[in-house]
Image: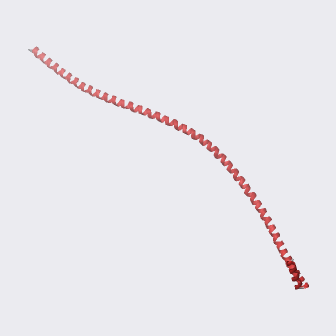
Amino acid sequence: MVVLKSMQQEFSSMQQNISSIQQNISSMQQEFSSMQQNISSMQQEFSLMQQELRATREDVKLLQQDTTIIKTDMKKMDIKIDKNTIILEDLRAKLETAAEVQQAHMEQNERQSTVTMRTINDRSSLVETAVQKTSEDIGEIKDNIDVLTEMTGKHEVEIKVLQRRSV
């Protein structure tokens, strides 16, 4: 009986060990299940990350295309700016030349105007002198006619005037 009891105790101890092992296995199974869920979740996250990475690559490609287009447009704009700069420089030179020509014409006109005004003033003075001289001469002629009229008689002059009108 001692052997049986000893065997029963060993059997009982083995059962406890087996029960403990089973608990450990159950615990390990739970941990394994949890790990499988974590792995599954990580796979889903990894799949999402791959999709986001693809989208990001597509965005980068679009940005590169946009950058290429912008560079092309900027080259075209640089060419146009260079052409416009040349045109502006040419226009500036022409405008400066036109301003110089206009300034020269204005100075020439001023000189001619001054000469013309001097000539007009000289001639005006000359005309004034001539008018005064003519006025004086007319006054003298009138005086001479008055004297002649008195000398020949007023009637005789009137007869001569009438004779000339009727002819």
Dividing the image into 4 quarters, which one contains the N terminus? top left
Q: Residue furthest right?
A: 151
Colouring of the image: secondary structure
Vertically, is 31 above or below 71?
A: above
Residue 49 lies in what quarter of the image? top left
Tell which of 44 and 103 is nearer to you.
103
**Which of 139/23 is in front?**
139
Which quadrant of the figure contains the C terminus? Answer: bottom right
Please give the name of the residue rendered at 64% of the width and 45% of the height, measured from the top-left corner. Answer: 87
Which residue is rendered at x = 73% and y = 56% of the image? 105
- Quadrant in the picture for residue 112: bottom right
Q: Nearer the viewer, residue 138 or 22?
A: 138
Q: In this view, does 18 lie above or below 45?
A: above
Q: Where is residue 52 in the image (x, y as percent from the top left)?
A: 39, 33
39 displayed left or right of 96? left
Residue at 87% over, 80% down: 163
- Report x, y in % for residue 9: 13, 18
Against 117, residue 139 (above or below) is below
Looking at this view, is 121 or 42 the one in front?
121
How many labels were placed on the picture?
0
Decide if residue 122 is on the left or right side of residue 57. Answer: right
Residue 146 falls in image quadrant: bottom right
In the displayed structure, does residue 8 sit left or right of residue 139?
left
What x and y, as percent, mark residue 23? 20, 24
Q: Residue furthest left?
A: 1
Q: Which residue is drawn at 34% across and 28% down?
A: 43
User: Going by the image, does 28 lie left or right of 87?
Assistant: left
Residue 56 screen position, x and y as percent: 42, 33
